[in-house]
């Protein structure tokens, strides 16, 4: 595997882990709130944030797959 691709993969994996950790943290916070009570608005915001971060993590996963596929074709 070329060195540049390896460095890129390391960066992508690090960002993916960062997003996954943040998603877990936000989901933990969300689990402590009452979505039907006073925390409804906060729950909504946390849910939107979690879904957006998950979408970005999925995009990173696709980018990681693309880099690996390109390297395997070489």
Image (cartoon, rainbow, N blue to C red):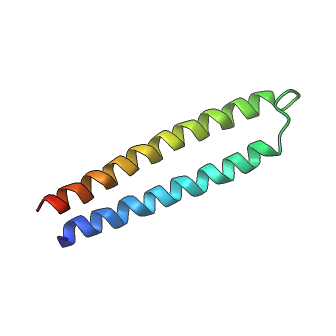
* Number of marks: 0
Q: Residue at x 55, y 54 (%)?
A: 20
Answer with left or right where residue 39 lies relative to residue 13.
right
Q: Residue at x 26, y 69 (%)?
A: 6
Indicate whether 68 appears above or below 47.
below
Which residue appears farthest toward the right when viewing the image?
37
Indicate whether 24 appears above or below 30.
below
x and y, in percent, of residue 26 in the image: 68, 47
Answer with left or right where residue 38 lies relative to residue 46.
right
Indicate whether 6 appears above or below 23.
below
Image-quadrant location for residue 58: top left
x and y, in percent, of residue 36 in the image: 85, 27
Q: Residue at x 60, y 53 (%)?
A: 22
For the C terminus, the quadrant is bottom left
Q: Residue at x 19, y 71 (%)?
A: 1
Indicate whether 60 appears above or below 15.
above
Answer with left or right where residue 31 lies relative to residue 19.
right
x and y, in percent, of residue 4 in the image: 20, 67
Answer with left or right where residue 13 lies relative to residue 3.
right
Image-quadrant location for residue 10: bottom left
Which residue appears farthest toward the front when viewing the image?
73
Image-quadrant location for residue 37: top right
x and y, in percent, of residue 70 in the image: 18, 56
Q: Report the front residue among 25 and 67.
A: 67
């Amino acid at each position: 595997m070329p060195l540049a691709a390896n460095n890129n993969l390391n960066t992508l994996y690090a960002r993916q882990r960062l997003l996954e950790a943040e998603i877990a943290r936000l989901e933990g916070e969300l689990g402590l709130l009452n979505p039907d009570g006073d925390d409804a608005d906060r729950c909504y915001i946390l849910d939107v944030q979690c879904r957006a971060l998950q979408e970005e993590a999925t995009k990173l996963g696709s980018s990681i797959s693309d880099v690996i596929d390109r390297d395997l074709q070489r």
